[in-house]
């Protein structure tokens, strides 16, 4: 059955997303600020050795703008991310049980 195989892939995607949310939220418990580096897409140099579809993928720091951005997550952010991630992970484990009940 094709639907069963496709739903397993969706289950894996949601499980990975839930685990990511849990890990990212738990990291936010230990940091006060995040320093994010700002990048700007620029045209590739003329003597660039890269050819093909990756020729336009050249990124450099823009000297006119600040090179870093400080992000201060709120006190609610880690708790919310961990909670939503846990709900998504728990839901992915209940999908097979729900699907087997509807097949009977």
Image (tube, grey):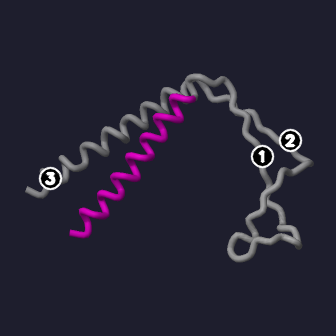
**10 Å neighbourhood of mark 3: few (<14), some, or many (≥20)?**
few
First along the sequence among labels 2 and 3 = 2
Numbered disc 1: secondary structure: loop
Tell whether label 2 touches label 1 (CB within 8 Å).
Answer: yes
Q: Count the labels in the image.
A: 3
Kindly identify the residue that appears in the image at 59 percent across and 22 percent down. 30
Considering depth in this image, is 63 or 53 the residue closer to the camera? 53
Instruction: Assess disc 1: are there few (<14), some (14-19) or many (≥20) residues with their C-alpha within 10 Å of its C-alpha.
Output: few
Which residue appears farthest toward the left when viewing the image?
A: 104
Q: Residue at x 7, y 56 (%)?
A: 104
Q: State the separation of the CA atoms marked 1 and 2.
A: 8 Å
The disc placed on residue 100 is 3
- Which of disc 2 and disc 1 is earlier in sequence? 1
Residue drawn at (35%, 58%), measured in percent from left and top? 9
Q: Position of residue 31 (x, y in %)?
A: 63, 25
At which x and y percent is residue 53?
68, 74
Q: Secondary structure at mark 2?
A: loop
**Residue marked by disc 2:** 66
Prevailing secondary structure of the magenta residues: helix
Distance between mark 2 and mark 3 Cα atoms: 55 Å
Part of the protein shown in magenta: 1-27
Residue shown at 73%/34% (left/top)? Answer: 35
Rendering coords of residue 64 (x, y %)? 92, 48
Q: Quadrant of the N terminus?
A: bottom left
Give left or right: position of 88 versus 25.
Answer: left
Q: Secondary structure at mark 3?
A: helix
Q: Is residue 36 magenta?
A: no
In the foreground, 90 or 59: 59
Identify the residue under disc 1. 38
């Amino acid at each position: 059955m094709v639907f069963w195989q496709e739903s397993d892939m969706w289950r894996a995607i949601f499980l990975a997303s839930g685990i990511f949310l849990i890990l990212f939220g738990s990291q936010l418990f230990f940091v006060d600020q995040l320093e994010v580096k700002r990048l700007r897409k620029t045209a590739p140099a003329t003597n660039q050795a890269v050819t093909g579809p990756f020729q336009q993928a050249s990124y450099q720091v823009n000297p006119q703008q600040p090179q870093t951005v400080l992000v201060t997550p709120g006190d609610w952010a880690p708790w919310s991310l961990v909670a939503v991630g846990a709900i998504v992970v728990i839901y992915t484990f209940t999908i097979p049980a729900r699907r087997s009940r509807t097949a009977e």
